[in-house]
Amino acid sequence: MAAWAERLSGVRGVLLDISGVLYDSGTGGGAAIAGSVEAVARLKRSPLKVRFCTNESQKSRRELVGVLQRLGFDISEGEVTAPAPATCQILKERGLRPHLLIHEGVRSEFDDIDMSNPNCVVIADAGEGFSYQNMNRAFQVLMELENPVLISLGKGRYYKETSGLMLDVGGYMKALEYACGIEAEVVGKPSPEFFRSALQAIGVEAHQAIMIGDDIVGDVGGAQQCGMRALQVRTGKFRTEPLEVEPGLWNAHQLS
Amino acid sequence: MAAWAERLSGVRGVLLDISGVLYDSGTGGGAAIAGSVEAVARLKRSPLKVRFCTNESQKSRRELVGVLQRLGFDISEGEVTAPAPATCQILKERGLRPHLLIHEGVRSEFDDIDMSNPNCVVIADAGEGFSYQNMNRAFQVLMELENPVLISLGKGRYYKETSGLMLDVGGYMKALEYACGIEAEVVGKPSPEFFRSALQAIGVEAHQAIMIGDDIVGDVGGAQQCGMRALQVRTGKFRTEPLEVEPGLWNAHQLS
């Protein structure tokens, strides 16, 4: 326990990934990961500030929070940092009108966005929406633009559903990058801006915060690059393959 | 004309790309590109050796040749170097049993291949077959292998159909590479082995041959790396965007 106290000294805030850490998504709303409902409750009773920091882009925050509440989690919409609202802010700031390649579940987040005469493409984890026809349409929109802008909500390789590993948005982002000869802008983890906006929401500095996630790149690597500490859980997409990681990678489930 | 004679001096053989050079594929069998039927006929009347060198992976050679013959081209199955037969040879040599993510039109080329208990994935231009479900299945097969092998029939970015630009297999290859953290083996242009097998078939050395294609990477770059001369046509996927190419890039239609 001495080692843990040392590793966590000065921590005032905790950023929690959702998918693979709190629950595995899937049919029927998915399943809570053993111990996670209690771990969140315990963190919330502690003096630590807690923020949920997710790359979930299949569901609106409202829908996601509904699923988690039904699984017993103490969570509200205002506690969640998610890529769709962050993307909407960027679109408005830059006068961008998106062609959307997204899941129907997250479309409501874009309700007040002008989508006439698109001058960019926004891609998110569209799941079954990643048909050839939809991908080809996004490709054609980009190829018709003089300055093609592709915004990707996260760049995850895959995630775990109750039924198994599932391709995430990252591969499809790479496909469009390659076909169009462009580079996407990623909104979400591991983007430093995204972590900073989550930290700002709880008024905690990076060196006082710890990120808990299952993705070695998006969660752990991204947080460490921002000056945060990070903790990889052994649930979700965690695999026991050889990983090139920073020393000091711990099992988050020891926390609770 | 003096310049042309100099550029073509010592040429004994011509490799011809098919899609975007001879015809644009599309509904109803596609359309011959103006002048191409006559150019092939003229080449065949000349002392030059002619070989068709294609990355077409939606159709079997038989089907492809049938389409071209109906458009008026003088072409037979034995004159075509294509990635599916080359892949079958590799699968047999290495004892690989593929999970196929391919177009139904090319499936007959794999008729005598053992596909039980797959130990590799073969990906080709599957067109509408690139559904999320099919991509995810290929991804899951690769993730379950201890030494995942991904073979891609070409790595084209896109091609031109009569209805417009279409995503080619390359982007989907990149998606699986990224999601699985692996590198694909490419069978087809611009692989040097592929060009060499086409040259062997007509008994011509690389320095005596010229490749005619519409793809600056797959056709022109690949051929040049093999020591061949190359010529980019201004049809098919050719675009007047700034390109980083070798000097000495000519308009093939001046040939005929």
Image: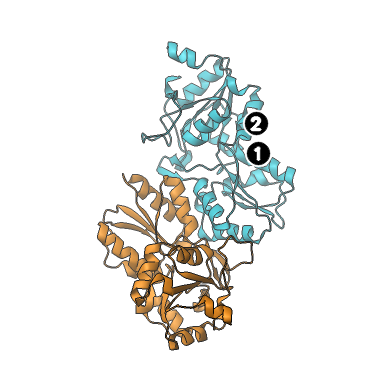
Chain colours: A orange, B cyan
Instruction: Give the quarter of the image for residue A195.
Output: bottom left
Contact between marks 1 and 2 (CB within 8 A): the answer is yes
Callout 1: helix, strand or loop? Answer: helix
Residue that label 1 marks: B86
- Within 10 Å of disc 1 (Cα), the crowding (few <14, some 14-19, many 20+) is some
Q: Mark 2 = which residue?
A: B197
Q: What quarter of the picture does the C terminus of chain A occupy? A: bottom right
| Residue B229, image x, y percentages | 53, 24
Q: Earlier in the sequence, mark 1 or mark 2?
A: 1
Given residues B191 and A135, the one toward you in this image is: B191
Label 2 chain ID: B
- Please give left or right for residue B147 compared with residue A246 in the image: right
Amino acid type shown at disc 1: Ala
Indicate the secondary structure of the residue bearing disc 2.
helix
Residue B183 lies, in percent from the top left, at: 59, 49
Subunit bearing disc 1: B
- Residue B130 or B228: which is nearer the viewer? B228
* Residue at the (56%, 14%) spot, across then down: B10
In the rendered image, the vertical position of residue B54 relative to residue A9, given as above or below: above
Kind of residue sitting beneath label 2: Ser
Instruction: Give the answer, above or below, for where B70 lies relative to A254.
Output: above
What is the quadrant of the N terminus of chain A in the image?
bottom right
